[in-house]
Structures are given as structure tokens and as C-alpha cells.
Amino acid sequence: MTVRPSAKLALTSLGVLTIVGCSTATGAHDTGTVIARTTSWPLTSLHYTPNNNFSQSGQYLPRADGFNLADIDAHAKAEMDRLPTGVRGLVFLGDCGGATASFRSTVDAFTHDPKLFGFYVIDEPAPSSCPAANLLAEDDWIHAHVPGALTFAILQNLGHATSPTYAGSYTPRNSGLNLIGLDPYPVRSELSSPDYTEIARYVRMAEASGWPQASIVPVYQAFGGGSSFDDATGHWVLPTAVQERQLLADWEAVVPHPKFDFTYSWGSQDRDRALDQSAALEAVFAAKNADPKL
């Protein structure tokens, strides 16, 4: 898979998520599990977490924690074909060349695929190197030739984490995108405590650039460490379970009902620690993704 740099990313008390009616940790995945919902989080029935989704034998691994949108490489359609019942694919294109012959051929291979949710067109494009007109041409092709498919990209913050801006970037009109991800990652080494207020600031700036709340996909931080640095010469830190619950609560305050949610990241990309290496965080997301209120 292409390395995705976005993977550089309070309303309630920090309550404990309680699993009722199961005697083991795996019971949190069982159908019919009842959850005492003492923490707020955005409510959606669709959950995505990218990178290293498949075992060597082709098993879709994040399903065990309730993730039902799979990370599918555009040139690995066989991954889509093998998805279990109830799981759909978000196909990563990573392309900003416009609706070229190669782009059209890649997209058209997924036409009428019943397991397709949509296309992850590109990750954190820069307006200086990825013209909005190219994205619009790509999105127009997708919408015209793959009925029902949604288009998605993570927007790059053109400012700093403490003062985000999307001014002069992409809009629904100039890009054609249906959905955009915002990726504040407040748990960082240079801070004495996470700056959870970043979440609301990112959302306000996106809305100021013309993106309606319904188009915003929350990107939850579930990685840390590695060799990447943030914009203050620190590095991202894998959240604790308590910190993750607070992140979810602050996202719920500003985007309570997204089309889907995005947890970065299931697998490691740059020697960082990720969700599949933290049983504590997996338990948080397994409980959230099994929320019976949906």
C-alpha cells in the first residue's frame, strides 16, 4: 500500500466502557453484546482503519474489532472479492493526474461491484501540486461511471496544528468530493497534555471553507512513535485508552453523525505503534463499533 502521510494526525467524563453479558474479552465482538455507553462518540454504522488489513492467508483482520470498511488497494481487486459478508471496500487510488486512460481503467474495474463503498481518491493533496481541476475530473468520472460510489480524500491542513486553515484549498464545488477527512492528532510528545481543542478548530476551519458537517469524516488518532515528526519538532504518541475516549467525546461534540469514521491506523507504517499493537485501544474501538444505539 502507498504510505499515507495523513497518518500524521469534552463533553463527558472519562468514563469506562463496560461490556455486559460476556465473560471474556472476545465477547465484545459477539452478536448481541450489550454496552454500557458511558463515553460519547460519533454515531455511524461504518468504520474504517487502513494499512495491513489482510493476513498472509487473505483474512480481513480488523473485522474482529467491528471495522466493516476495508482498505483496498486499487490494483488488488481480489482483496475486495474475498471480503466477508457485511464488509465493504474503500478503494485507495492515490491519484491526482486527472481522468487519464489509466485512471479510467482502474476505476471502471469496480463498476457494479456490490462490495464497493467508494474511492479514497487521494491523501492530503497539496493545492500547489494537485490542481482542484484534476480532482474534479476524477470525481466526475467516478460519479458518472460507478453509480452510487462515494469519493473521499483527507484534506491537508495548510496551517499549523494550533492554527489550522483550509483557505485556498479544496471545496465541494471545485473538487467534486463527497466526503473529506480531517486529521488533528492531539497526543504529541511536546505537549504536557493532549490539546483536544484542535479537533473543534479543524472542523470550524473546514466548515468556513464551505464543507458542510455532513461531508466531514472524523479521523481518530490511534498511532504514535516511529520516525515521523509533527510540526513542532515533537512526535505523535499512541493515545492511552482514557485519552482515546476523550478524543471520541470531542469528535462527537462537533461531528455527531458522520457517514463513516476513520481510525488511523490499523497497522504500522513508519516504525510507529498502531492499533493492532494495542489491546487496550482495540477494546475501546471494539466497544464503540458495536454500539447498540445504531
Image (cartoon, rainbow, N blue to C red):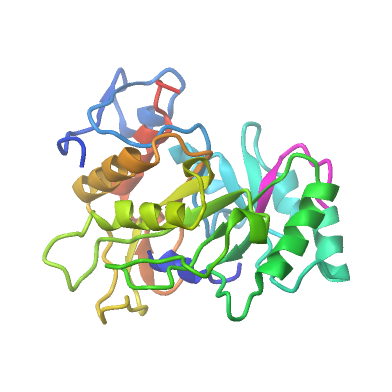
Location of the N terminus (image quadrant):
bottom right
What's drawn in magenta, residue-wise?
A: 109-120
Residue 282, image quadrant: top left
Lateral position of residue 120 relative to residue 82, left or right: left
Lateral position of residue 123 relative to residue 114, left or right: left
Up-down: is 292 above or below 132?
above
Which residue is located at x 28 percent, y 48 percent? 247
Lateral position of residue 180 relative to residue 207, left or right: right
Up-down: is 241 above or below 13?
below
Up-down: is 78 above or below 38?
below
**Which of the pair 150/277 is nearer the observer?**
150
Visible residue check, residue 81 = yes
Location of the C terminus (image quadrant):
top left
**Which of the pair 132/198 is nearer the observer?**
132
Residue 290, image quadrant: top left
**Which of the pair 253/61 is nearer the observer?**
253
Q: Is residue 114 magenta?
A: yes
Visible residue check, residue 75 = no
Which residue is located at x 72 percent, y 61 percent? 136
x, y (%) of residue 113? 79, 42
Up-down: is 287 above or below 222?
above
